[in-house]
Image (cartoon, rainbow, N blue to C red):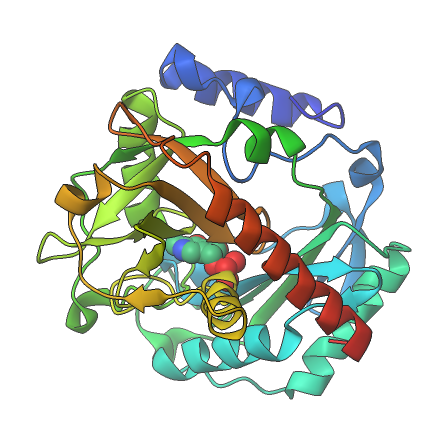
Amino acid sequence: MPPYGSLYEKTLLIIVGRATRKQYLPFMIHGTHNALADDRNKDVQILVNGVLYPRNEAKISVFDSGYLVGDGVWEALRLHKGVLVFLNEHLNRLWEGAAAIKMDLPFTKEELTAEIRRTLDANQMFDHVHVRVMVTRGIKKTPSQDPRLTLTGPNVVIIAEHKQAAPESTKKGIRLHTSTIRRGAPDYLDPRLNCHSKLHEVQALIQALEAGADEALMLDTHGFVATCNATNFFMVKNGEVWTSTGQYCMNGITRAKVLEACARFDIICKEKNFSLYDVYSADEAFVTGSFGGLTPVVEIDGRPVTRDAHQLTNQLRKHYQFLIEEAVQHGQ
Ligand SMILES: Cc1ncc(COP(=O)(O)O)c(C=O)c1O
């Protein structure tokens, strides 16, 4: 449990812990999003619609469209050595998501970047920082889906925290469980959309936790392997790196960087359809995300994945780190 937990947070964690199974009590979390505890986070300033508030005073209305109906889009990015790495990619994805849900953004990418910077400066942040940018359609007149009942422009919340991935996640690796919850077709809720409702993924994760795993592996509507609930999935077979076609998963920035690294460092990488049939005889497997980078998968559905001691995964992690350093040198 984070040492900065307020009484409210602690009570919530206990309730959540009681309502779920013992094996995934919140203070024993192990997975790709496991962070080192950092006391400084109890005092961070959070930006809500242009105003900085101390953590405990940062609030959003109960009439917020994101709260009411999951109507909003978000990004999570990293600050490395003072640089918001892959910023353009993150901003492009946010703008694409907003266009997909027809949410007009009354500010430019430069203006949003300035707001992120203001939040980082207010918190004197430089390295190992995770930034969550959330944009919802706005305040509704009454609880409703109807966008015409939105009274204000978008609500913009920026949460920056000192968050370093726990080395244990990379060292120990994670265990996946295949969920029965599928990634939907693009004409339902396009799985590439990073929207405020993550209930689909939460349900998949709960199944995985109930099964004693750390995260969920999710299939597409045809039964091919698509992705994980909060990261993208890769496997290695006979020296080749495979990932899904990208049509049924969030188009992760880290996923794109792994594909780029494979192209630059002459590693064969294929975006293709494959099934659990292939996964169960994979030589290696790993998942990707901005927070944890590349995390090895050591078990899938109770079957160990340790054949190649994650050699290629470790090599790719170094290549990914190289791309980050390169981005830092170029200032983004
Ligand atoms: C469902 C899902 N897949 C994959 C990712 C990883 O994306 P990225 O590499 O851009 O952090 C995320 C991150 O939020 C996610 O929510």
Residue 215 location (% of width, % of height): 38, 35
Closer to the camera in the image, 198 or 72 = 198
In the image, is residue 125 above or below residue 280?
below
Q: Is residue 117 left or right of residue 136?
A: right
Query: In this orientation, which residue lies closer to the viewer: 152 or 234?
Result: 234
Q: In front here: 310 or 100?
A: 310
Please report the residue visible at 40 percent of the width from the left and 63 percent of the height from the top: 195
Q: Position of residue 154 (x, y in %)?
A: 55, 74
Give the residue drawn at x 49%, y 76%: 93
Displayed quadrant of residue 67: bottom left
Number of on-image labels? 0
Give the residue at x 43% y 47%.
287
Q: Is 303 left, or right, of 35 in this rendering?
A: left
Whole-percent x, y for residue 140 in the image: 44, 67
**Residue at left 31%, top 61%?**
249
Say left or right for 133 vs 186: right
Q: Quadrant of the N terminus?
A: top right
**Taking 84 as reference, is 313 above or below it?**
above
Q: Is residue 216 above or below residue 207?
A: below
Quadrant housing the C terminus: bottom right
Q: Residue at the left extreme? A: 222
In which quarter of the view is residue 179 placed? Answer: top left
The answer, for residue 108, to whether it is visible in the render is yes
In the shown orientation, is residue 31 left or right of residue 19?
right
**What percent of the width, then of the height, locates residue 286?**
42, 45
Tell me, yes or no, if residue 63 can be seen here: no
Quick one: 9 or 282, which is closer to the camera? 282
